[in-house]
Image (spheres, rainbow, N blue to C red):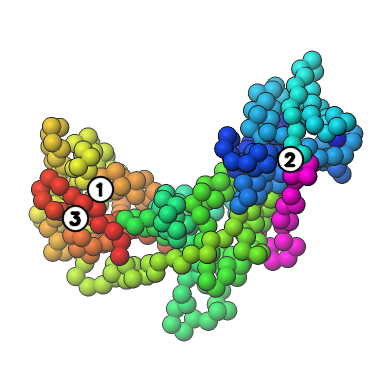
Amino acid sequence: MKIRCFKDDIIDGLQKAAGIIPSKTGAAYLRTIWIKADDAAVTIYATDTSLEFTGKYPAEVLAPGLAGVQGKAFVDLVRKLPAGPLQLSLDSEGKTLSIEQGSRRYKLPTNDAQWFQNYTPYPAEGSVPWAGDFLQELLDRVAFCISDEDSMEAIACLSLKKAPLKPGQSAEDPELVVEICGLNGHQFAMIRFRNDEIHSLIPDEGLLLHRKYVQELRKWLAADAFELAIEDRRLFCQSGDGSETFSMPIASYQYPDYYNFLARLAGENTSRLTVNRQDLAESLDRLSIFNTETNRCAFFHFADKGTLTLTAQGQDIGSATEQLDVTYQGDLKKIAFPTKGLLEVLAHFTSKELAFVLTGAEGPCGVTGVDDPEYTVIIMPMKIVEETYYSEEEVR
């Protein structure tokens, strides 16, 4: 194998490939990036046995062939080289890859070519287009609520499913809705959107993508359009020009029925609060100074319909009290939220004012905003055990 290419043509793909392979642990073949030269192009392959990445880039192929090198070292080397042409060549025994740039010479040991396994090709049929920037926004809105504990199985996944049909609505209705959501036991985020092609692509049972795969997908996504396909319980993403393919397995867990606690937001005996998002965030940020490991919440006191009193107290730190002008309707007098958790929720909205639906001192609280259509976040309050000790409730 012998090729000439430019660093700027391959470095982005190399870094994407390096992002999915283990750096130090795991079998040697999993730490390998494969370089294949043929048809006036160089193709880069990487996998961790679950994720698969393939990138094809322009190159002058002087001799076709295949070489596998220690991925992190190779990518670090290319990344630190200046921009310009590179020459990659495999020795006659297939054991050493030489990298040359001007007077610079480097050699890396290669792995046995028999280790190379064929990668799953992008499906020939059933592909649909999607905007990368739109999907990135969706993921930004819900991914923070995905559980980071792998042992949690289904709720360690992103859920993408068809919304239930409304009474009298047919499956041919052009206004069919897709729901994408994340859940971690004490927070839930969901955004609904309309896209006929994505709706038709999603299996009737929905699909689940593990959090760690979603993280890599977010790194791969660009702002422009890409193609999406599903085959053999794998989700495939392909760049608009067809040069890169990224695929991941679809999880087989049973996702919790979140409509139960969504229904509570529309039930009777709820209290409703409307508050300026920035004012609330700034107050909570100051109150967080007074939080400790055991006292990590902010109290909301509803003394009258036009004023919200916020308090926090920390042993050996002191106490804080602030008041905000709000609109409030309801009978709830007091509720406590994890301060940092609520700040995180507020940061994912753009609306000037937010509406809170409070189902009780220990029930789910829904947050929505006029300028954040079809977006709902639920946060569970802290159970008030006594004045200075709280335990976190879970979504039921």
Most common SS among magenta residues? loop
Separation of residues labelled 3 and 2 (CA atoms): 53 Å
Pointer 3 or 1: first along the chain: 1
Mark 3 vs mark 1, foreground winner is 3
Secondary structure at badge 2 equals strand
Separation of residues labelled 3 and 1 (CA atoms): 10 Å
Separation of residues labelled 2 and 1 (CA atoms): 47 Å
- Residue density around tag 1, few if under 14, some if 14–19, many if 20 or more, within 10 Å: many
Which residue is depicted at the point 74% across and 44% down? Answer: 115
Q: Name the residue under label 2.
A: 34
Magenta-drawn stretch contains 76: no
Q: Which residue lies furthest to the bottom in this view?
A: 168
**Relative depth, front residue between 30 and 274:** 30
The amino acid marked with disc number 2 is: Trp
Percent position of residue 180, x then y: 47, 61
Magenta-drawn stretch contains 115: yes
Q: Mark 3 points at which residue?
A: 383
* Mark carried by residue 338: 1
Which quarter shows the N terminus? top right
